[in-house]
Image (spheres, grey):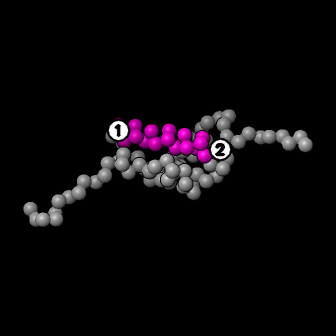
Amino acid sequence: MEIGTLATPSPSPFARLPGVDAVLCAPELESLVEDWGRALVGRAVRETLDGLRGEIAAGAAPKIDVAAVAARTGALLGERPGRGPRPVLNLT
């Protein structure tokens, strides 16, 4: 075996998952953060990442880049009725 030919192990799919802040800063979520608030979108991102961890643990190979996680988070928030911005009547 030659020196320098050792293969470096590829990072675990879990290690390649983006961080919550990276997803929250994604342009795809900018309008959701404005509409729903950073705290609620942050919780949805965490929920999305937890779901992805479960899929990876089950042997699936989901897309785990920032854009894919942001898209899943947007879809998750879209499924939640009764949340998000509410209409307000200005009676002044």
The residue type indicated by label 2 comes to Trp
**Mark 2 or mark 1: whose residue is earlier in sequence:** 2
> Is residue 92 or residue 77 the one in the foreground?
92
Instruction: Indicate whether residue 49 is drawn in magenta.
Output: yes
Look at the numbered disc 2 and give the secondary structure of its residue.
helix
How many marks the image carries: the answer is: 2
Rendered location of residue 57, percent (x, y): 35, 38
Magenta residues (range) = 36-58
75 relative to 12 in the view: left or right: right
Circle 2 residue: 36
The relative height of residue 79 versus residue 3 in the rendered view (above or below) is above
Within 10 angstroms of label 1, few (less than 14), some, or many (20 or more) residues?
few
The relative height of residue 60 versus residue 16 in the rendered view (above or below) is above
20 relative to 34 in the view: left or right: left
The relative height of residue 44 versus residue 10 in the rendered view (above or below) is above
* Residue that extends furthest to the top in the rendered view of this protein: 82
Front position among marks 2 and 1: 2
Q: Quadrant of the C terminus?
A: top right
* Residue that extends furthest to the right in the rendered view of this protein: 92
